[in-house]
Image: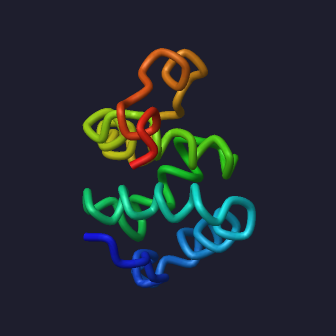
Amino acid sequence: MNTMVSFDIAQGNPGALTFIMEAYWRHLGKAEQAFRRMRDNDILGTRLYMLWNDCCGRNTDRAIDIMLTQNIDKIVKHINYEGGRGIPFQEEDQNNEKTEIYKTGL
C-alpha cells in the first residue's frame, strides 16, 4: 500500500498526534516512510505514542530511526510490556539490529 499516511493513524490520541506532527516537521521523507511501516503493521494511536514517549523518551529522531531500523516484533515487544509502560530502547538495540528496510530505503 503506497498511499500517504494520514493523521488518522493517531486514532484520536493527542500524544500520538504531537509525535506525528513533530516527525513530519523535522523529516518529511523519513517520517512518511516510518509511519507507513507502522501503519502497515498496526502500530497506531496509543501504541504509537508509547513507542515515542516510553520507548524513545520523546526523542523524535530516535523514534524515527527505531521505526525504520528495528524488527517489528522487537518494536511490539517493547510497546506491549506488561508493566503498563513501554520498555526503553537502549543504544545497543539501535546500533546492532538494522533491518533491510533502512538499508534499501523501502
Quadrant of residue 15 within the rendered picture: bottom right
Query: Looking at the image, which is closer to me, 99 or 74?
Result: 99
Check the image and tell me how it is coloured. rainbow
Residue 60 in percent (x, y) is at 67, 52
Q: Provide residue 86's location: percent of width, then percent of height.
A: 45, 43
Whether residue 49 is situated above or below residue 71 in the rendered picture: below
Quadrant of the image containing the N terminus: bottom left
**Looking at the picture, how far across and down is residue 75, in whole percent?**
36, 40
Q: Give the residue displayed 38% in from the left and 40% down from the top.
A: 101
Residue occupying image coordinates x 55% and y 46%: 54
Query: In this view, which residue lies farthest toward the right?
Result: 26
Using the image, determine if residue 35 lies above or below residue 63: below
**Residue in the image at 54% along x and 15% along y:** 92
Q: Which residue occupies the foreground of this view, 59 or 2?
A: 2
Quadrant of residue 14 within the rendered picture = bottom right
Q: Is residue 58 left or right of residue 37?
A: right
- Going by the picture, which residue comes out furthest to the front? 104
Residue sitting at x 31%, y 43%? 76
Q: Percent from the top left, x then y, of residue 25?
A: 73, 69
Number of numbered discs on residues: 0
